Image (cartoon, helix red, strand yellow):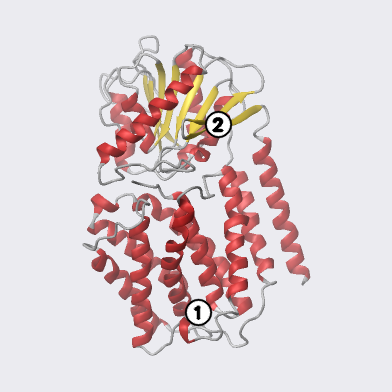
Amino acid sequence: MKKTHIFISLIAMLAIFVGAWRLLEARGGVDIEKTLVGEIPTTIFRPSGPSNGQVALIAHGFAGSQQLMQPMAMTLAHSGYTAVTFDFAGHGRNARPMRGGVKDMQESTRTLMAEIEQINAFAHSLSSGNPIALVGHSMAADLITQYAMDRTDIGAVAALSVFGTGITRTQPRNLIVITGAWEPAMLTEAAARIAGLAADGPARERVTYGDFLQGTARRYVLAEGAEHIGVIYSRDGLTQTRDWLNSAFGQTMTGAIDIRGKWLALLFAGLLALAWPLSKALPVLSAEPLGAGLRWRRLAPIALAPAILTPLILWRAPTDFLPILLGDYLAMHFVVYGLLTAGGLWLTSHGSPKDSSDWRKPLAPAIALAAYYIMGLGAPIDAFVTSFMPSSVRWLLIAPMFIATALYFLCDEWLTRGQSAARGGYAFSKLCFIGSLLGAVALNPERLFFLIIIVPVIIIFFLVYGLISRWTYERTGDPRVAALGNAAGLAWAIAVTFPIVG
């Protein structure tokens, strides 16, 4: 191994060690207990030292899991609260499906509300009869505000990124609304509108209206530098929630704030950097790099045609064949997109992956790449970000998702790789795919609206996978290695994170 590879490996491993160490260090002073409340996976965060006797129930948003709410739970536990997180039906490791999905919102709301009721009863069993706090993000923010209406056993509510349907001047009790400053206007405007219900005129940000003792306190905050997910990790989101609960319950204890963003960035930057020297350990499979190697004039129409045609083909097509919300549509999008790309390659006589040499050669390095995605990157994601390890029916969803993603990635890698491939063609083809998904949402917003939330995550995957696939291709000379590895990694991610519906 060259000295440069050794140096990068050492720097990467140092970054991984420091990032993981600081993330684990934040758990000091907090006792963490995992349990089941009925069938609901639940985690209790208790302060190891003095407790203020108050309990906070914390709920995650759509396509999230209780791991996503760890920073909030840790921050409150460090300030004396007992924090309770859980996985909603169809999310994380909860084996129960989210009945109704997005087709029957009343049914899905009933399912999720029933689980809030169940966890609320559990949280009250820990509270010694004291009122508890509810904290929720996105989908859960609207659920907890509805649930807390006219309930005197709920002493305070913190709603992060809430739409605010049904909220009144006095209900729910003692409500703070925290929205990322970079979120869409409809959310920032909703935050101001909700606080304004208690003000005699337009509400000012970070000003408290109403009275805590009467339960009418209201406040809204725009978290600096935060978007829809970042608000969970932002200093404003964490400190404003803690301080609001302290004011509502007459508490003064404060402790460490779990600001983990920079340590997560360091950890995953190290894992990404480590992939470069590791790629040099892969075998050279082809002395002459394989791939169509198209210049821009020929690549552009083959890349653009599927982006335009796929949403139109699937506009009215039935795609309900997998018990995973939006996963069935995504699978069909990958399949149709891949077939159209293959058709474009065939019509222009530029070959396809099936024309390449022995298919046994790329399998072992592709499996190694997939293992790095799933375990090397996936295990830290599961520990510190969101649920990434499959349970129950999710194991059965990986195979059909892989078939769909493999068809897409094999054709896309073949299209954009080769000795004379257009510079920037790989990024262009991915932008076409993202544009295609947004086009699908525009054609069918009622059914595919939640794809808008997922698109940023897919962009991140494309950026990470694209960089690693480049290193893999430079070493192996065979685009099938990265195609199969990327397909396995993305299929796994979709199967283990998208909500299970019934």
Viewer-closest of 345 and 228: 345
Q: Residue at x 33, y 21 (%)?
A: 172
Provide residue 44's location: percent of width, then percent of height: 56, 28
- Name the residue tied to disc 1: 417
Q: Is residue 338 above or below residue 345?
A: above
Amino acid under disc 1: Arg
Query: What distance separates the C-alpha of mark 2 from that of mark 1?
Result: 49 Å
Q: Residue at x 27, y 71 (%)?
A: 309
Residue 254 makes an appearance in the image: yes
Q: Earlier in the sequence, mark 2 or mark 1?
A: 2
Q: Is residue 206 visible?
A: no
- Drawn side of residue 370 relative to residue 351, left or right: right
Indicate whether 366 appears above or below 158: below
Residue in the picture at 24% in, 50% down: 446
Nearer-the-camera pick, 381 or 206: 381
Q: Regarding mark 1 in the picture, which secondary structure is present there?
A: loop
Judged from this view, the residue extending furthest toward the bottom is 349
* Classed neighbour count for the residue bearing mark 1: other residues with Cα under 10 Å, few (<14), some (14–19), many (≥20): many
Residue matched to label 2? 35
Up-down relation of residue 128 to residue 76 (above or below): above
The front one of 344 and 244 is 344
Q: Position of residue 421 (x, y in %)?
A: 48, 82
